[in-house]
Image (tube, rainbow, N blue to C red):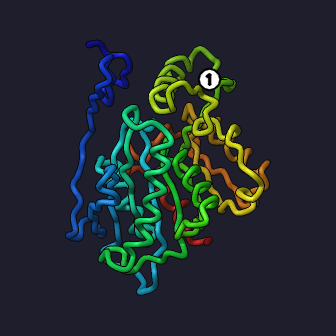
């Protein structure tokens, strides 16, 4: 049995199809007030399974309803969890700063569960939210008329596709108010300028591996989940597409893809699209350095976006 794919310190895929994951430090949810917020693990669909973690401010600054943020973690669709310390800290602190209720979703991972399973799992979280608002204690103050989607890297990709699915489905119980992808993970068979330089060879190899593990077998990087330009969507989707703010990092290998995504949305006629760059930061810095000044600024920018809508 040999290793056929590996992300050092995170993932090993073996020739017999087995997968070994190495999680960084994790943290448990706590219904007791910690750092001015409470958190609770929930089961979204036990049959798959899909789980999540809710974050709420311990001391809301208002008795009014609070907006909802549904967040999808990154990890190339193959790794990652809402239990990781970086995600828990970032989202807990964000719920306090923004006075927002956050649902962070743990979807099924590739290669055992290839795309579009992650999209379907994360869309299911919207259905679950609409059903639980009346009974789940931590959702009592949730405003289901103000639902925002966000996620980093692969989670930013997922946020886009869940928004599309919500628009296309007449049965979707929630309307998406806004979209906030962070360092979104997209690709294509055609390389970008940065992907073709020698210095990018290692990043290109790693990205290609994650795409190979996550897209349907027999597909290539022009699969619609990878290459947004290949998703055949009518104008009826774009006229309903929610206001979108895309966050990129200046030192991120994927910055080009985020900029291309913004230009694509503008070309499709999406009226409210903005690009925000953290010039000297790297990919998913907010997860690795949740207490940094750059992360604090990102949280402030996301809060302002939510307050606008």
Horizontal relation, residue 16 to residue 96: left or right: left
The C terminus, quarter of image:
bottom right
Residue beneath disc 1: 195
Query: Which of the pair 10/97 is nearer the observer?
Result: 10
Q: Is residue 155 visible?
A: yes
Looking at the rendered image, the quarter that the N terminus falls into is: top left
Which residue is drawn at the image coordinates 37% and 61% (left, top)? Answer: 93
Would residue 193 appear left or right of 10 to someone viewing this image? right
**Image height of 91 relative to 186, above or below:** below
Dividing the picture into quarters, in which one does residue 137 lie?
bottom left
Q: Is residue 74 above or below residue 52?
A: above
- Residue 181 in the image: state x and y as whole percent: 55, 51
Nearer the observer, 9 or 143: 143
Query: At which x and y percent is residue 140?
Result: 36, 80
The residue lying at 39 percent from left, 76 percent from top is 133
In the depicted structure, whether residue 191 falls above or below residue 97: above
User: Which residue is at 35% across, 70% downward?
Assistant: 56
Q: Where is residue 11 in the image (x, y as percent from the top left)?
A: 33, 28
Does the rendering let one see residue 304?
no
In front of the other: 73 or 228: 228
Rendered location of residue 126, percent (x, y) = 47, 63
SS at mark 1? helix
């Amino acid at each position: 049995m040999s290793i056929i794919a590996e992300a050092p310190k995170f993932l090993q895929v073996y020739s017999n199809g087995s997968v070994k994951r190495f999680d960084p430090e994790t943290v448990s949810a706590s219904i007791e007030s910690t750092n001015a917020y409470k958190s609770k693990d929930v089961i979204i669909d036990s049959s798959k399974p899909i789980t999540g973690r809710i974050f709420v401010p311990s001391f809301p600054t208002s008795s009014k309803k609070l907006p909802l943020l549904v967040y999808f973690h990154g990890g190339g669709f193959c790794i990652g969890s809402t239990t990781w310390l970086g995600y828990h800290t970032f989202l807990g602190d964000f719920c306090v700063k923004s006075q927002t209720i956050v649902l962070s979703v743990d979807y099924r991972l590739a290669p055992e569960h290839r795309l579009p399973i992650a999209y379907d799992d994360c869309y299911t979280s919207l259905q679950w939210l609409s059903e639980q608002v009346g009974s789940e204690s931590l959702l009592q103050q949730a405003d289901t008329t103000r639902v925002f989607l966000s996620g980093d890297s692969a989670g930013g990709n997922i946020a886009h596709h869940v928004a599309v699915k919500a628009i296309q489905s007449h049965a979707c119980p929630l309307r998406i108010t806004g979209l906030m992808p962070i360092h979104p993970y997209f690709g294509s068979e055609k390389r970008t300028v940065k992907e073709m330089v020698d210095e990018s060879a290692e990043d290109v190899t790693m990205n290609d591996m994650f795409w190979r593990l996550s897209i349907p077998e027999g597909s290539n990087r022009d699969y619609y989940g990878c290459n947004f330009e290949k998703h055949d969507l009518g104008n009826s989707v774009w006229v309903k597409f929610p206001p979108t703010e895309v966050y990129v990092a200046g030192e991120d290998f994927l910055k080009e893809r985020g900029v291309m995504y913004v230009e694509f949305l503008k070309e499709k006629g999406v009226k409210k699209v903005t690009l925000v760059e953290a010039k000297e930061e790297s990919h998913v810095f907010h997860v690795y350095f949740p207490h940094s000044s750059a992360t604090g600024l990102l949280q402030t920018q996301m809060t302002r976006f939510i307050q606008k809508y």
